[in-house]
Image (cartoon, rainbow, N blue to C red):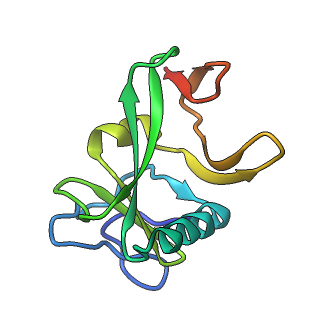
């Protein structure tokens, strides 16, 4: 797994868009190879292989917050962090980044679940449904 913060360039990752945040975060988000490959397949199946995946957090749900993972067709906004892994761009807004810093986005494929899963060291409590959480 490789962390690629916005502002870095080169083979591992590239900040995209003139409005993407320039300075790299001190403690970023790690995208696993499995998560990147799953995202790439989903974007291709959708017919938008050049789109991005937006990662975020929203308030509400049983434990306080829930993770948001959605397609992003427009590209990064000002003050977004942009990560690239295996040719797929992942975008995180500044507010959500506060809750996701230090996390790993993984892909899980079990009998009970198939999809993205955050491993977040900031979580202090998780709901029984597995989709909502609370932080320190």
Q: Residue at x 34, y 64 (%)?
A: 6
Looking at the image, which residue is at 36% across and 79% down?
A: 9
Indicate the quadrant containing the N terminus: top left, top right, bottom left or bottom right: bottom right
User: Residue at the spot x=31%, y=72% of the render?
Assistant: 15
Q: Judge left or right: residue 112 versus residue 94.
A: right
Give the image quarter of residue 47: bottom left
**How many numbered callouts?**
0
User: Residue 2: where, in percent of width, then height?
Assistant: 58, 66
The image quadrant of residue 113 is top right
Instruction: Please determine whether, in this image, residue 35 is positioned above or below residue 56.
Output: below
Q: In the figure, is residue 1 to the left or right of 122?
A: right
- In the image, what residue occupies the spot 84% across and 44% down? 111
Residue 4, horizontal then vertical, whole percent: 46, 66
Residue lying farthest bottom?
Answer: 11
On the image, the x and y values in percent for residue 63 come to 52, 16
37 to 99, vertically: above or below: below
């Amino acid at each position: 797994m490789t962390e690629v913060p916005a502002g870095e360039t080169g083979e591992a990752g590239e900040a995209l868009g003139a409005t993407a945040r320039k300075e790299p975060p001190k403690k970023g988000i790690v995208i696993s190879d499995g998560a990147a490959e799953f995202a790439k397949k989903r974007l291709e199946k959708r017919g938008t292989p050049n789109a991005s995946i937006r990662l975020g957090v929203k308030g509400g749900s049983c434990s306080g917050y829930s993770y948001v993972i959605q397609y992003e067709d427009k590209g990064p906004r000002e003050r977004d962090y942009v990560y690239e892994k295996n040719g797929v761009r992942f975008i995180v807004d500044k507010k959500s980044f506060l809750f996701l810093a230090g996390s790993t986005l993984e892909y899980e494929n079990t009998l009970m679940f198939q999809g993205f899963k955050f491993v977040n060291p900031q979580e202090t409590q998780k709901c029984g449904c597995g989709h909502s959480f609370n932080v320190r």
